[in-house]
Amino acid sequence: MLTIGCHLSAGKGFLNMAKEAVSIGANTFQFFTRNPRGSQAKPIDLKDIELFKSYASEHHLKPILAHAPYTLNPAADKPETREFARIVLTDDLNRMEHLPGNMYNFHPGSHVGQGITDGINRIAELLNEVLTPNQTTTVLLEAMSGKGTEIGARFEELKEIIDQTHLSDKIGVCLDTCHIFAGGYDIVHNLDNTLNQFDKIIGLNKLKAIHLNDSLMPFNSRKDRHEKIGKGFIGLNSFAKIINHPALKDKPFYLETPQENLSGYAGEITLLKKLYQSEPNSDCGIV
Ligand code: FE
Ligand code: FE
Ligand code: ZN
């Protein structure tokens, strides 16, 4: 079965997100742990958590994916910026334990001129401070497009962060199709090769989630601009191959495409379900 969801607004709580997910045919979802710009998180609503848990098990929802605010920069040169990242990561991971066994994704960060090595060292240093042996949450490093001084556009960089992290069994990777395509991995013409490289460098067992986004910008542009599925440079035929690839078909997929409302996501989920387990290269009408 295809595990698919989309990014939902967390404003009305977990139960509401779960109901929205089910209403659009999803069996998981992603949400921001707090305002994406990184303000104070709302207090935990234990009643909402309990209602969510029973609704989720009743409707067979898969593990959900939390997303850190994207202003977080654990690789920053300024100590106060890293301190902010430490406080947010610590608080978010504590809160995640109210919902055991889920995943938490963050952008590794930007080295802002210090160089990749120093940036990587700082990210790993922070992870070594905030990860705990008893946590049940898997923390995911998101693969990036490499805009500016972003770290994590090369699989080698993600591998280096994982290697430097003591509790590396708590770490996984989230591949964003838009990011890696814009970052120079040609998943349109060389999906097998990209996944082989990932397996050789990091290991496919570390691949825990996929952000499914088309790209408004061309291959290797190093620009992070998401587009609706099938409307960008990646194209529908490639998404059919991605969701059916033996190395990917059982992983969870999350849409982060630009949509005005939930019905946009509902349409994409319906489309992807139709493409799932079809033969991407056969005469099924996909060109
Ligand atoms: Fe992201
Ligand atoms: Fe993403
Ligand atoms: Zn992005």
Image (spheres, rainbow, N blue to C red):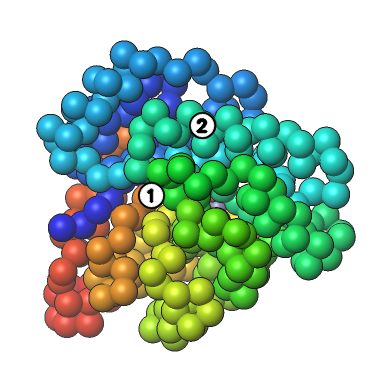
Number of disc labels: 2
Looking at the picture, how far across and down is residue 173, in whole percent? Answer: 49, 61
In terms of image quadrants, where is residue 2?
bottom left
Looking at the picture, how far across and down is residue 273, in whole percent? Answer: 19, 56
In terms of image quadrants, where is residue 205?
bottom left
Q: Which residue is mark 1?
A: 255
Q: Is residue 85 visible?
A: yes
Q: Which residue is mark 2?
A: 94
Residue 171 is marked as: none
Q: Which residue is at 17% across, 77% downward?
A: 279
Indicate the quadrant containing the N terminus: top left, top right, bottom left or bottom right: bottom left
Up/down of 212 relative to 137, above or below: below
Disc 2 versus disc 1: distance between alpha carbons?
Answer: 26 Å
- Disc 2 marks a residue whose amino acid type is Asn
Q: Which residue is at 31% across, 69% downward?
A: 248
* Front residue (pair 120, 128): 128
